[in-house]
Amino acid sequence: MTPFNTLSAIAAPMMFDNIDTDAIIPSREMTSTGRTGLAEGLFAPWRYVEGRVPNPDFVLNRPEYAGAQVIAGGANFGCGSSREHAVWALAEYGVLCVIAPGFAPIFAANCIRNGLLPLVLPREAVESVAGREVHIDLAAQTLTCGDETYSFPIEAEARTMLLEGLDAIDLTLKSRPAIAAWLHADRVARPWIYL
Amino acid sequence: MALTLADKIWDAHVTATTPAGSDLVAIDRVFLHERTGASALKSMAAAGRPVVDPRRVFAVMDHIVDTRPGRGDKTLMLGGQAFITETRAAAIAAGITLFDVTDPDQGITHVISPELGIVLPGCTLVAPDSHTCTQGALGALAWGIGSSEAEHAMATGVLRLPRPKTMLVRFDGALSPGVTAKDMALALIAAHGAGGGAGHVVEFSGSAVRALDIEARMTLCNMATEFAAMAAIIAPDEKIFAYLAGRRYAPVAFDAPYWTGLHSDEGARFDRTIVIDAAAIAPMITWGTSPEHAIPIDSVVPSGPARAHDYIDLAPGAAIIGTPIDVAFIGSCTNARLSDLRRAAALVKGRHIASSIQKALVVPGSSAVKRAAEAEGLDKIFEAAGFEWRMSGCSLCFFAGGESFPAGSRSISSTNRNFEGRQGPGIRTHIASPEVVVASAIAGAIADPRLLEPQA
């Protein structure tokens, strides 16, 4: 996975709450069991009008935000279905970071596993940076926009995974002896859970 | 130290703690479905990673299967058949247990897992499906994950996670007649927002929760993901232990010391506590495009986000009762278990849906629910009333490119999501209990089920 260190980009504004994963990638756009070919369907209900013609009013169809690497969204971003396709579609389109006052937990976890940064800031801060150039420094946990610098929180483990571009499964497999020892003891303690 | 139920289960599953402070949490059960299952299994196979314990991994065909009688692998969704055939091939190759399209145990993941005793009190269960939180109703820590996390769980037997925060939601008192678990969930989300539970394991407690039967508890826990909670859980009681006895994958005898200790200790500290007066809850219905846009059915549309009003085509101040509807759907992991169908059938018996309704479907939550309902004659009651009686699956809960109805249609649905386009492009969805769906289908417009007397 590509490490995430710093990023300077314009934050495309999508400042409304509860942007769900059905809107990010509708189920009907998930046409194969693969993880690719999804960028075309990103935000399809809003991005296209009848006949799959680009909707000129949609933010990512405006020249200044086309190909945006950062999206500034409203609260509870990524709510709804657990479909990781939402994150795969964003990543394939080129989005590296979503800034929002809060994320649905499954979406945030999916972001981390795919090298995207779910960046939490207070609503006023998100509103203030939406549509502007932002500079994000993950190691420092800061976002700078104009003269303002905001600190943002992130779980220590998630931060490391993103900074180093780590594969979670490879990392966990290094703990195989500890897991095996636990399983050995658990088979005695909870034999009923094993089939 | 006094511990919460969620913390007890978490502690019992920590195999190791990472330097950054996350835990490697043992996962007892993984459940896949055809919409994301093939993707995860194929990706693992490509990476040369085997499923570490295939006997504890299950898969079912539920999301896009055809629900019309005589179905096979073909789906109404264009290209959907590949999801079924590829999931089948990948499941067989991985050696996991598969409940296939024609299996008598086929059904919606969160309906069949309890039916078969796959989910158990005190276990950890994950599935690449947001409504996995449903299964917390049996006292398990069960939560939805993405495909990568599903691979992680299957390849390592654990997930790497920081310990979640805990929230207690206590429903005191008793529900009024005609008010259901669905209404409890919608009332909670309406009051505290669709993001209100973000990152928390929510424990539901209180006299109104203890009084719920097991299926109603599943309905309540089901909607926790619409509250952005990681998981929902209810302390298991004798009702749960009795329910599980004799089910195929359940142990012969319950684990007395572990299972009976599965409750939050007196004085356990939660990160947040919400108390709700159950008696004050009315039948709820959504007016907008988020589950947080829920209101008592006898009230008026409040002022909300303009885009929600525009999409749903209802202005602030309008009465929700009397809004004409085109489609009625009873189904989904939220409200398609036998008790849901019995309550709906009791209201619909001897009546007929309005002639203006273009489509009315009842889709049982599992093949077992379908058989049980047919044994009681519920299918005949629904059919006599003008509903179609289908085979089990997720059906109209979401639109994958298959069955839908014309843009602009208004749907009354016993499902969990009223998002823009969730049931098809331009479809306006109102979610509510099966009782409200039935009353509205009969009236041809949104109606209060309390005004319908059950017929003899």
Image (cartoon, coloured by chain):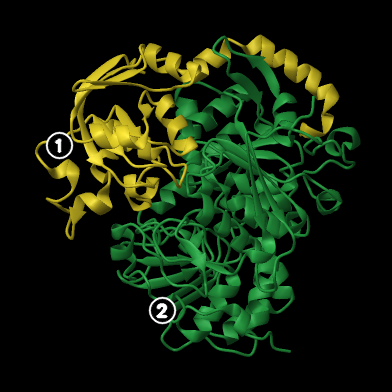
Chain colours: A yellow, B green
State which quadrant residue B445 falls in.
bottom left
Question: Cα distance, mark 2 to mark 1?
Answer: 40 Å
Which quadrant does the C terminus of chain B fall into?
A: bottom right
Chain of the residue displaying label 1: A
Q: In this view of the protein, can residue B333 be seen by the observer?
A: no
Left or right placement of residue A121 versus residue B144 in this view: left
Q: Position of residue B448 (x, y in %)?
A: 55, 78
Which quadrant does the N terminus of chain B fall into?
A: top right
Front disc: 2 or 1: 2
Residue topped by disc 1? A66
Q: In this view of the protein, can residue B384 be seen by the observer?
A: yes
Task: Decide which of B21, A110 is in the foreground and name it.
Answer: B21
Residue A177 drawn above or below residue B333:
above
The disc placed on residue A85 is: none
Residue that sits furthest to the left in the current view: A63
The disc placed on residue B323 is: 2
Label count reads: 2
Q: Position of residue B432 (x, y in %)?
A: 53, 67
* Dot 1 amino acid type: Ala
Task: Decide which of B305, A40 is in the foreground and name it.
Answer: B305
Whether residues under marks 2 and 1 lie with C-beta atoms below 8 angstroms apart, the answer is no
Report helix, strand or loop for mark 2. loop
State which quadrant residue B427 falls in.
bottom left
Task: Decide which of B27, A71 is in the foreground and name it.
Answer: A71
Residue B270 drawn above or below residue B373:
above
Report helix, strand or loop for mark 1. loop
